[in-house]
Image (cartoon, rainbow, N blue to C red):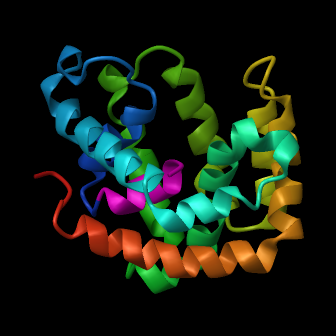
Amino acid sequence: MNFLAHLHLAGPDPAFQVANFLGDFGKGRIESFPEPLQSGMRYHRLVDHLVDRHPVLSRCRSLVHPSRARWAGVISDLIWDHFLAKHWTEFSAVGLETFTRRFYRELKSRPEWHFGRLPTIVDSLCQERWLEHYATLHGMRRTFNGMSYRSKRSGPLKFGILDLTEHYCAWEARFLHGYPQLLDSLKSHPPGK
């Protein structure tokens, strides 16, 4: 899962959402991070574990062009965020903009939790409103382009937009089938517990 899905799956508590979000940036032993972050980071890793083994996600990765197979997981995660944003009202009673603004506000109010390259990412994430932009193809094109500059080897990510547009209906059908299954599988693992 990418940022938006992780936040949605983390439940309604903005502080827990932030701790969960930081699971993408905190590597190593969870116990080495401040206590308030640990449960959110554990939940992040649990979700990643369940998603990596989910059969619908495996079938989604097959929609990525073979030349980008190394990046199939990242591309799939971003594309699922696109469809979550697009179909947000089917999965949340709170509007996408309200949800993301609450998260941005909470994230910025916790600078003591920002480590590594996070301060730069936080500024960009909040000012450019990354999460809302996932809902449009233009926003996804920007996202894939931005991701392609993260390292010398990530250049192929910019072509993830082709994987999305060439198989748009298949991605959407798989998301609409798989995301509710993922939500069901997480019912026995409520956030923050």
Which residue is pictured at 38% across the width and 82% down the height?
93
Which residue is pictured at 46% across the width and 47% down the height?
104
Which residue is pictured at 15% across the width and 51% down the height?
192
Q: Position of residue 111 (x, y in %)?
A: 36, 25
The correct choice, above or below, for 85 with respect to 151 in the image is below
Dominant secondary structure of the residues highlighted in magenta in the image: helix
Residue 172: name its quadrant.
bottom right
> In front here: 104 or 87?
87
Which residue is pictured at 70% across the width and 49% down the height?
75
> Extreme left residue here?
193
Q: Which residues are magenta?
A: 1-10
The correct choice, above or below, for 149 with respect to 164 in the image is above
Q: Position of residue 166 (x, y in %)?
A: 89, 68
Q: Is residue 147 left or right of 53 when viewed as pictured?
A: right
> In front here: 71 or 20?
71
Q: Is residue 158 left or right of 19 when viewed as pictured?
A: right
Residue 145 in sight from this viewpoint: no
Residue 8 magenta-drawn? yes
Q: Position of residue 58 (x, y in %)?
A: 57, 58
